[in-house]
Image (tube, rainbow, N blue to C red):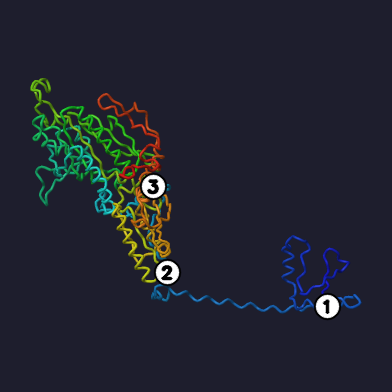
Amino acid sequence: MVRSFSPRDDATPTFRVCAFRRRPRCPLAHAPPSPFARKQQSAAPPTEEVAALEVADADGTAAAAPAAVKPAKQPKQPKQPKPPKPTQGGGGDGGDGTAKKVVAKETKLGLSARKGDDFAKWYSELVVASELINYYDVSGCYILRPWAFAMWEAVQGWFDAKIKSLGVQNAYFPLFVTEDALNTEKDHVEGFAAEVAWVTRCGTTEMDKPVAIRPTSETVMYPYYAQWIRSHRDLPLRLNQWTNVVRWEFKYPTPFIRSREFLWQEGHTAFATKQEADDEVVEILGLYRQVYRELLAVPVIQGKKSSKEQFAGALYTTTVEAFIPETGKGIQGATSHCLGQNFSRMFGIEYETEDKAGGEAGTGRAHAWQNSWGLTTRSLGVAIMTHGDDRGLVLPPRVAPKQCVIIPIPNSKTPPDVQAAMLAKVKELRAALEARGVRCETDARVDKTPGWKYNAWELKGVPVRVELGPRDMDGGVVVLARRDTGECLFCFGGGGGGGFSSRRRRRFVFLGRPLASRARVCLPPPPPPVLACSDDGPRLGAYIPQRPRSETPCGFSFHTKYTNGSY
């Protein structure tokens, strides 16, 4: 039995019977002891000395407990210095007895800049880190790496098939243009005078007549149009060429957007009547709109440029314009020009009319009405700026070089036979997807972790990632991850095709519709239609009125149009 004094009544001792000796309870029933009380408790003698406290005698009198003797404080031992940590890599010291500095390993995978913070730096990092371009020794010129060129080939293949169905034929004209031909159309050459690059020397010999590198091909092609067009039976003449041009830009060269050499297609056509020329202008502009909306998932506004912004020497210029939300500025996507009879008069492109008494002034001869239209690799830059995020590219599936990447993820404990079965399943999945027209890639590298692979393919913008691990093998499933939204889904096998039904394929591979819808939200309201109407051209208006989102090809809803690859 231990007797303890209650703080509530110092004069009257209280008693309690306990099986174990405990520390005194806190005076308050439900409140924690104060810091001062904790300090006193920490300084209390150990349990063995509790018996030395006052213990009640048989007659109730308290016996005095002997005073506790405080142990003498031990002097503090001096701290021993910690031994130096060994350097990593087995490098030892630096030769002078000092340890080498340990450098943390960096993968340099990913972007340091953020799209919303420093857009220019983000874009410059992205196009290099995602293996789209490489900088060249000549300022303003860039190397298009296979990943970027495959995107351009996708645009080229689609558009080339469309214009061929209209009766346009491909041709190729030389890169150089003589000074006399370039100066034939004065307004035209004045518009490009500051951008024309000239060849003035051959080896160590100065050339008698310098030649220009084409900034565009009107002056290269039209002297020969004058030779080929003699009669109304020679019309219409509709030619296109896929080529490069050089414009010696000095205004902040930007990859894909503004460079001194770029790839493009340029169409040059000649017609007997203005109505035919006007119809083609609108028709080609509609194809450019489809390139942006259906292939690149970028919303654009169709319209007509002002007289100050139109093509040099043209009668009028129509355009599709995109919008970059981060910069708050519009960007020219592609142009379709009606040249009128301006160039045909300068280069003598005239023909005999069907009515011998007709033609101009009853002479039975007339000048051709001409158009020119072009789309450049700038279209890729617009898509990159519109869809890219802080993790890298977000590619629309129809232009993505690879629409799907399959990544097996065996762990260190996976038996070799299971790993072999996993790789066999990966090959089966790839064959099933490629049989359905899906461009696939398999990443089975053993020197990279799954996380590293995920980041690498996200940086390159592959629309869908397929993951297959040991547990997925046991459950007969694969994991699909979308690049645009990050959404993941378990896809069960069975039914043939490696577990990818046509519905899954439409939803998780052809993802251009959600991309276009997300980009369209940022599109600013168009100007009033009357601002772009003119009496000397077709009544295009400033824009083509947009239908409700549920009806437009870039809406979120899925319908049967997906089966034929249309958005």
Give the labeled residue for mark 3: 119
From this view, report whether residue 271 is shown above or below residue 382. above
Instruction: Report whether 2 appears left or right of 540.
Output: right
Q: Crowding near pointer 3: few (<14 within 10 Å), some, many (20+)?
A: some
Marks 2 and 3, Cα distance to the nearest angstrom?
Answer: 34 Å
Q: Residue furthest front?
A: 495
| Residue 160 image-quadrant placement | top left
Q: Position of residue 346 (x, y in %)?
A: 14, 30
Instruction: Give the quarter of the figure containing the N terminus.
Output: bottom right
Say which amino acid is labelled 1: Ala
Look at the numbered discs 1 and 3 and tell me whether their residues touch, using CB distance below 8 Å: no
Of labels 2 and 3, the one closer to you: 3
Marks 1 and 2, Cα distance to the nearest angstrom?
Answer: 63 Å
Q: Position of residue 246 (x, y in %)?
A: 21, 44
Q: Crowding near pointer 2: few (<14 within 10 Å), some, many (20+)?
A: few
- Secondary structure beneath dot 1 equals loop
Say which amino acid is labelled 3: Phe
- Secondary structure beneath dot 3 equals helix
Give the labeled residue for mark 2: 102
